[in-house]
Image (tube, coloured by chain):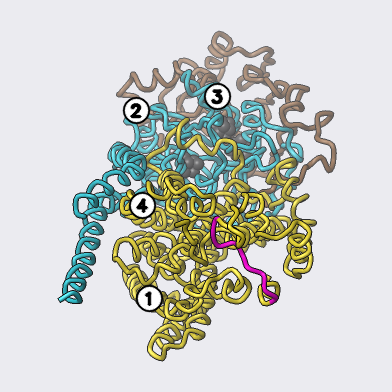
Chain colours: A cyan, B yellow, C brown
Amino acid sequence: MKKLNRRSFLKGGLAGGAAIAAVGTSKQALAGTHNFGGYPDSMGVLVDLTKCVGCRTCEAACNKEQNLPEPDKSFDDPSVFEERREGGLPRRTTEKAYTVVQKYDVPGREHPLFRKVQCNHCNEPACLTSCFVNAYKKTPEGAVIYDKTVCVGCRTCMVACPFYIPAYSYSSPTNPVIKKCIMCYDTRLKFGRPPACVEACPQEVMTFGKRKDLLKLAHQRISDKPDAYVDHVYGENEVGGTAWMYLSDVPFDKIGYDTHLGTQPIISYVKEFLGMVPMVLTIWPALFTGFHLLSNRKDAAKNEENKS
Amino acid sequence: MNSLKSQGFAPVVSDLKKDGSEWTVKEKIMLGLSPKEYWAVQLRNPFNWVLWAIYAIGVPILVGRFIFGLGWVTHSSYDYPWGLFLGWGLFTMVPLSASGFMMGTTVELFGRKDFKSIERLGLLNGLLGYLFAVVFLQVDLGQPWRLIYPMFVSLGPAAVLFLVAWHVATYLTCQVAELVPAFSEWMGFPKAKKFIKSIVLGLTIAGIILSTLHQGALGALFTYAPGKVHPLWYSSPFQWLHFFVSAVFAGLSMLIVVSTLTKWFMRWRCDENYLSNLSKLTLGLAKGASMALITYLVIKIIGIAHDNNWAYLLTGWGAWFMFEMVVGVILPLIFYTMAVRNSNASLARFAAILAVFGIALNRLNTALIAFNWQLYREIPHWRELVIVFTVYATYIVVYRAVLARMPILYTWKEKK
Amino acid sequence: MGGRKKTLLGMAALMLLTAPLAAQSWAAEGPGTVELGSLANYYSAVTFDHAMHTGVAASCAECHHHTTGLAPTDPNCARCHKAGDKANSVACKSCHSDKRFSAEDLAKIEGNPQLHHKGKLGLKGAYHQKCLGCHTAMGGPTGCQDCHTRNDKGDAIFHSGKYAPAPGASDGHGGGH
Ligand code: SF4
Ligand code: SF4
Ligand code: SF4
């Protein structure tokens, strides 16, 4: 009886083998991304919100650079600032726009504040770590790009992105894929050129450079003009740091930034589960085989009793 | 069919007809009725009328989803990437189908042969639930034809969904294997049954591992969205445990509900052994479910205490949370306990309905209602709802068809 | 004031040599008008009335920082250039790169660890921040086409004018619900 059990267990184990192998690699991969912290010389963009005038040249430039479909309204039409999506929220990135400029009327501020929204190119991107076909890639240059030829359309990255960035081409029946800013990687960043929106901005709201230099610059700007900025570089530490960072004269939580994201990358919230996977894989089989043998021994003992 | 049986109709229970000749497969599919009788029975059943109505509206819309894309059947929300297809079809169907691995464990591992007469129903409930969860997933995926990509084309092994995909796939295989005996009896292939018998223990243990992990993984999927899911439904360290433990009572409760339905509507197909044991087994399941419920209640409270989320209980969200906990957890717990104590199977059945409702509410809350709690509530598109009804109706049709034929609710009389 | 005038004249002479200015007409204090066209792409060149602006600006340093030899108005600049460090050229372009963020520009900044002006604006940014900053504060014109008209190429990229999307062209999927 015992012998048969062991044999049958081994056979059945094969069925689970594939899964176990799969999870084995999962552990390695996890170790690989653990406390990654970004490439040392990666590039970034510092966005100085105090300088933006809401001209939307960046949106126009992005539309052209990324070959995006024709917009619903001209890029010089200011009425888009008043548009509200569900829940009274301002416009967000869509399958047709990788970047949008939002307008905030801040009480006490003389002029409205404009905020350019696009992918923040996180150091440890939630989109990347949640993708089950490994479509995303963080390049050494700092961009978070993705391979749309493998995107299955599960949309987990959209759920995971703490900044509500990736959009999805729902309108396409045959080839819907994730759509988001790629920091102009294919056409520019790869060749050492700045993103199209950065270059197009008349106000030079955005400064392109090495992330570590930008951080110094950001803090220098704050210390040079302590009255002109709040003392916070948004993106320096948020969810493990992002390549795109922001300076503002208005507290970030007043202009739609989530200031409760914490400094841990999103994947760290999932680690507890991923960490217990190998445990289940190793302990469960032994544990339940043990249960089985125990319960059967009881049966056997009972049978003996009944016989006698 | 119940009335037919009372008129003396004898359903197929073995390879041989009364006169000693063998049933052909076609005859078995027709339930041993002549085609004319068979269709007459189908037409007479008012439940089928409802199904036809659902199909009349639902099938064109389901086809439309693949012709015009997801944008035609959903609101194309970027903020709510997951709607009812996953909220109901994946996150709710999968825990309700946890009965498979639990019945396997109870009977094969713990040697509780007394549960044998309901084991196959548990396994079938598991298999079909998973199968249709995959169907729902296929409706929801933007490019369903790429479903095998995470398996073979481009692997993202560090992602929780990768684990879900692999485990659901392997577990489905596992469940098919576990049901091969029922199929082989019905088809008359004794060899297949023998083979499965020899590996059943391995299959069962694989089933437990895979189930623990993917039931938990479904919860862990939401840990990717710490700021989006309301803190009362979110717990980074315990989310997987909450989902796993709640799947235990969800599966058991669903099994009680389904067995109750079979007792009412498919009595003709149940054999004496099944019917006479059902009340006792229901109470057995109730006991298991109540243990899972109390565990769940405790770890839910621990979850709240761990993140110090007490203050949220006083908000509107807190009231909604308490509603879910009281109706879906505490009441079923009380009723189950009373049912076990007083050997009252009807009360256990009522508790099961509440628990199933509670689980559905919990999963929909996590995936949709309390998701993006700081933004706005997404009301699904009506076409999305129609598709959910259509696919779920198909689940019921398939479920009923298998129950009517294969030896799930009755024991096959083997050839001597 | 006399000294300043002279400086300006000298400076303007230098400007002739260095700045790519298409046309300049001379007034008493520096160029009368300046054609700012080196970056013109989507817009026509700006004809900048320098003479008028010298009249409204409190000091040349408002725009030229310390390069004209006057004390800079920005206290941050004054930390080093308190007395005003006259530069060989006062043209915007001689300090503010018209190839900002290009590989060469970044390499130049990177390669000079001594460089203090690491965040120095490019030419376009310098123009716009300076012009718009003042115009906003003093009520000057601030619309893009108040200073330079957009050309056909500009209309195309902005999907405006004859390139404007047909009204109601939206397929309803652009709004994210
Ligand atoms: S182009 Fe620059 S100034 Fe204009 S809206 Fe974009 S970021 Fe703001
Ligand atoms: S902002 Fe969102 S989409 Fe962009 S890299 Fe970070 S997680 Fe990914
Ligand atoms: S970096 Fe490129 S893709 Fe991203 S918003 Fe700017 S122009 Fe668009």
Q: CA distance from mark 4 to mark 2?
A: 60 Å
Q: Is residue A84 at least partly visible in the picture?
A: yes
**Numbered label attached to residue B391:** none
Neighbourhood count class around disc 1 (C-alpha, 10 Å): few under 14, some 14–19, many 20 upward: some
**Mark 2 Cβ and ligand 2 under 8 Å apart:** no
Q: Are marks 2 and 3 in contact (CB under 8 Å)?
A: no
> Residue at 57% across / 57% down in the picture?
B16
In the rendered image, residues at marks 2 and 3 fall on the same chain: no
Return the residue at label 4: B197
The amino acid type, in three-letter code, at marker 1 is Leu
Tell me, yes or no, whether the highlighted magenta stretch contains residue B12: yes
Return the residue at label 1: B297
**Numbered label attached to residue C123:** 3
The amino acid type, in three-letter code, at marker 3 is Leu
Left or right: where C75 falls relative to A159: left
Which residues are drawn in magenta? Answer: B7-15
**Mark 1 Cβ and ligand 2 under 8 Å apart:** no
> Residue at 20% across / 59% down in the picture?
A290
Whether A150 is drawn above or below A288: the answer is above
Q: Are marks 4 and 3 in contact (CB under 8 Å)?
A: no
Q: Is residue C6 at least partly visible in the picture?
A: no
Q: State the image coordinates of residue A31 (x, y, percent, origin top left).
A: 28, 40
Farthest residue in the left direction?
A308
Which quadrant would residue A301 be assigned to in this image?
bottom left
Whether A73 is drawn above or below B226: the answer is above
**Mark 3 Cβ and ligand 1 under 8 Å apart:** no
Along the line of sight, which residue is nearer the eye, B22 or C4? B22
Chain assignment, label 3: C
